[in-house]
Image (cartoon, rainbow, N blue to C red):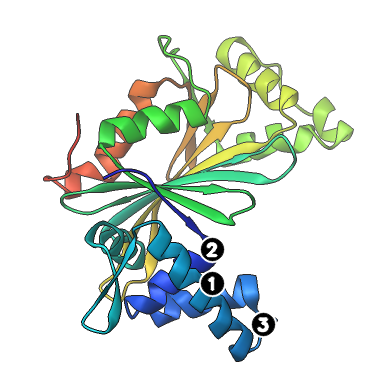
Amino acid sequence: MNKITLSIEELIYCFYNEGYFEHGNALKQVYFGELDDEKMDLLLQITTRSLLSKSLLVYENHKFMLVEELAEVISMLNYSNQSIKASRHGEDGGEESVSFHFNEKTVLQHSLLYDEQVHVFEKVTAETAAEIISEFYRLINHSSGNGFELSQGEFEQLLDSLEDNQKLFELPVLHGEKQKFYETLKTTNGMLNTLLFMEFTEQKEPVAKNVVLFTNDNKNNWVIEKNEDVFIVNLCNSSKVIQLIKENVLESLEKVPYGE
């Protein structure tokens, strides 16, 4: 399918049209909570014409219906077997994010523009999703280093030292990769980005399956994975992202398209 771009009011209309009133009402409350029912009804009437003009809505048997491709998108937003949300700190202090929703046949990219007022959807492969995430976190295709481990206490000590001079003097002497990692933390004021893997229960409730952290430098970022009480830190490249998607998503979705 081609890219589908929806304004927030168009997205609300689509949820209502497909009978997903809980999702529609939640978005309405966030973005149009102050509108009374009469004004909201007028907004949705205008939205109907907007979707018709985009050829995303048809009128059949005295009923407005979403075209098949858009109906599939809305269905995946309502429920998908697995989802990934990549978030990072933006230059303006806000948050930037891109999400991917997975079922047995489809990977759906979901991007937000203009303070979440516009939503863009596009079918991709899992391999393309990995490339987009790698670019999003500004990863370089270099060989990873040997990496190292940090206890939870050691990791917290590194972060605390960035804001507390007393904690800085308490730091042990760092060498090699640990020193490079700490320099990156200092350069980026300790900001960490998150890659969240989610799965959904039969009740359509999201459950966090895994969270992976990335440093927030403009290049050569580190990936931080937690294994019980130990943090495993490595310089990261795109092959690592592909590995993470395979381990956290594709192993439970054998039919999902991987390559082009």
Residue name at image x 67 percent, y 38 percent: 90
Labelled disc at residue 102: none
The part of the image, by quadrant, that contains residue 258 is top left
**Can you say whether 233 is above or below 111 in the image?**
above
Give the spatial CA distance, label 3 vs label 1. Answer: 13 Å
The part of the image, by quadrant, that contains residue 131 is top left
Give the spatial CA distance, label 1 vs label 2. Answer: 8 Å
Amino acid type at image mark 3: Leu
| Place of residue 81 in the rendered image (x, y in percent of width and height, measured from the top left) | 26, 59
Callout in the foreground (1, 2): 2
Amino acid type at image mark 1: Leu
Residue that badge 1 annotates: 27
**Can you say whether 24 is above or below 256 in the image?**
below
Q: Horizontal placement of 208 versus 204: left or right?
A: right
Of pointers 2 and 3, the one earlier in the residue sequence? 2
- Residue 22 visible in rendering: yes
Residue that badge 3 annotates: 35
Residue name at image x 53 percent, y 68 percent: 9
Quadrant the C terminus occupies? top left
Q: Residues within 10 Å of mark 3 (few under 14, many from 20)?
A: few
| Place of residue 111 in the rendered image (x, y in percent of width and height, measured from the top left) | 47, 46
**Can you say whether 39 is above or below 26 in the image?**
below
Q: Contact (CB < 8 A) between labels 1 and 2?
A: yes
Residue that badge 2 annotates: 8
In-front residue for pair 240/155:
240
Callout in the foreground (3, 1): 3
Q: Horizontal placement of 218 versus 196: left or right?
A: right
| Place of residue 229 in the rendered image (x, y in percent of width and height, measured from the top left) | 48, 44
Q: Secondary structure at mark 2?
A: helix
